[in-house]
Image (spheres, rainbow, N blue to C red):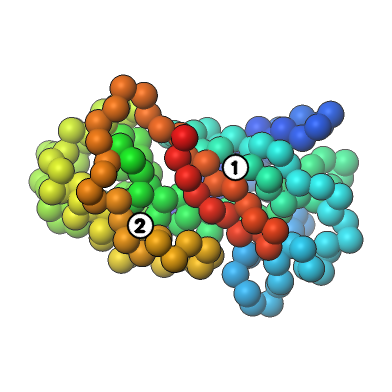
Amino acid sequence: MPAAFRSPTVDLHLTKITAKVPSVFGADVPVFPWKDGDVRAPSNGPIASTMTDRLEKLVIQSYGFPVILRDVPALEFHDQWMPYINWDELQAVVVRALAHKPSPLTGNEVHFIRQYIDAGPSDFATLSGGTLDQVRVWEKRETNATGMRRDQEIALRTRILDAVPDTTRTQSVDSTPNTSTFQPCDAQPQLVLTFDQAGRPRHHFT
């Protein structure tokens, strides 16, 4: 995926602390995965002793749509609070969560999905069962619903889940997209990811 999508600019909110995280972290900033592997979950990770709290709320604005993170594992680094998460895996969680959105996808969400899977407009048209011109029209809708046919959106949501692995393995229902209940609405629901005690996110929409 494009490097520009890996480290978003976010606002951090913690009691008595507000910090701005740069769009590109320095090489020495530790960022660890949630999944089991060389580094364990933040609760018992190798630098757990440096962690003093969690970020109550973190808002990502650089995806083209807001993503709200809550109870985010954090560490203090050079007198600033930093999220203790893996940005690449976070984007995978966001993409998979969009398959469960209770309303039609917006143009910016479709653009984010397309760039995440590194598909050109033509390839994405094939993936979604649309045409090249349709993909361009969808993305130009930006914060509004794309207007794509329901059968096309169902196919796209299903293929998203097939193409993007569930790296966090937190929600067993995540393997089935929301294909029967998403309906048009006046206000776009907001995606919220809440981190559990092991540092893994669970999504819901408000």
Q: Is residue 118 visible?
A: no
Q: What element carries label 2?
A: loop
Judge left or right: residue 187 versus residue 87.
left
**Residue 69 got which mark?**
1
Going 81% across and 32% down the picture, which residue do you hit?
A: 15
Mark 2 vs 1: CB contact within 8 A: no
Quadrant in the picture for residue 126: bottom left
Going 44% across and 66% down the picture, which residue do you hit?
A: 172
Percent x, y for residue 107? 29, 34
Going 19% across and 55% down the picture, which residue do you hit?
A: 155
Going 30% across and 37% down the picture, which residue do you hit?
A: 103
The residue that label 2 is drawn on is 117
Can you say whether 53 is above or below 57 in the image?
Answer: below
Quadrant in the picture for residue 137: top left
Percent x, y for residue 41? 70, 66
Q: Can residue 94 be seen in this view?
A: yes
Q: Is mark 1 on a helix, strand or loop?
A: strand
Q: Which of marks 2 and 1 is nearer the N terminus?
A: 1
* Residue furthest top in the image: 186
Can you say whether 123 is above or below 56 in the image?
Answer: below
Task: For the N terminus, give its image quadrant.
Answer: bottom left
Judge left or right: residue 31 versus residue 97.
right
Identified by mark 2, the residue type is Ile
Can you say whether 97 is above or below 205 in the image?
Answer: below
Mark 2–mark 1 distance (CA, rounded to whole Å): 22 Å
Instruction: Tell how many labels.
Output: 2
Judge left or right: residue 68 versus residue 72.
left
